[in-house]
Amino acid sequence: MIEQVPDSLEQKVPRLILVVDDEARMRRFIRMNMELEGYQIIEAENGVQALEQVRQHTPDLVIMDVMMPEMDGFETLKLLREISTVPVVLLTVKSDEEDIIRGLTLGADDYVTKPFSPRELVTRVTAVLRRAEWPAPPPRTILRIDDHLSIDFNRHQVIVEGERIDLRPTEYRLLNTLIQNAGWVVPHDTLLAKVWGYEYRDETHYLRLYINYLRKKIEKDPAHPQYILTERGVGYRFVDFRKN
């Protein structure tokens, strides 16, 4: 007979985080503060070690510095995305939007600009892990928008002219939020709070970037969208397909 352990007695397995930075002092600083929050930490001092650690230990999240010698964080991230979908938070000394967009385009989930407080880093890591745990939707049939577009929510795919196209987790959450409010304008800060988390409500560049990603995947002409419409200065609206 198998004895069931009461929920109150179950121990939560600590999340494993890989910290990648060529400066030992920074790794120690991050390790100390993340361990205080109950996370388990492993380290790497360069991109090559980072890739090996991901292969061997399958961490729940990676915190990685951008400015590393030989192979920087961008190059490491590009190679990492060939083998893993692990969430990545980039550390950068730059707040330039082009660098931010480059990191997000390569597959980073968030960034933190140096210098940062322990509280800021913990908040960002918690938010990224929370998004990675987005609950699966209940079973449902494929939603048919029209002859051009359908959405398979169970598989996180859009079907465009009969071709299935995978959605990244954030793209799926954003599209799902827009469709749940089809016909209504969803303000920028509301979308950011629902998709990324309340602490991201002012990070409008995230929203612009992922709206562009979605339009490239679902629109016949992304420059002249017919599904995801911009309400300038307010937010975005998914066309009310239910009227059709």
Image: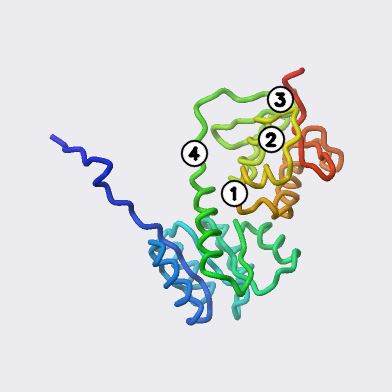
User: Looking at this view, is 79 or 139 the one in front?
Assistant: 139
Q: Position of residue 68 (x, y in %)?
A: 59, 77
Of the image marks 4 and 2, the number of the one nearer the N terminus = 4
Of the image marks 4 and 3, the number of the one nearer the N terminus = 4
Task: Please tell me which residue is depicted at 82% across the width and 39% down the height of the picture.
Answer: 231
Q: Quadrant of the N terminus?
A: top left
11 left or right of 3 in image: right
| Type of amino acid under label 4 | Pro
Q: Nearer the viewer, mark 1 or mark 3?
A: 1
Could you tell me how far apart the alpha carbons at marks 2 and 3 are, in whole angstroms?
13 Å
- Whether 122 is drawn above or below 197: the answer is below
Could you tell me how far apart the alpha carbons at marks 4 and 3 are, in whole angstroms?
23 Å
Q: Position of residue 165 (x, y in %)?
A: 65, 39
Q: Are marks 4 and 2 in contact (CB under 8 Å)?
A: no
Residue that numbered label 3 is attached to: 145
Q: Residue furthest top?
A: 244
| Type of amino acid under label 2 | Leu
Residue that numbered label 4 is attached to: 135
Q: Nearer the viewer, mark 1 or mark 2?
A: 1
Residue that numbered label 2 is attached to: 178
Q: Quadrant of residue 161?
A: top right
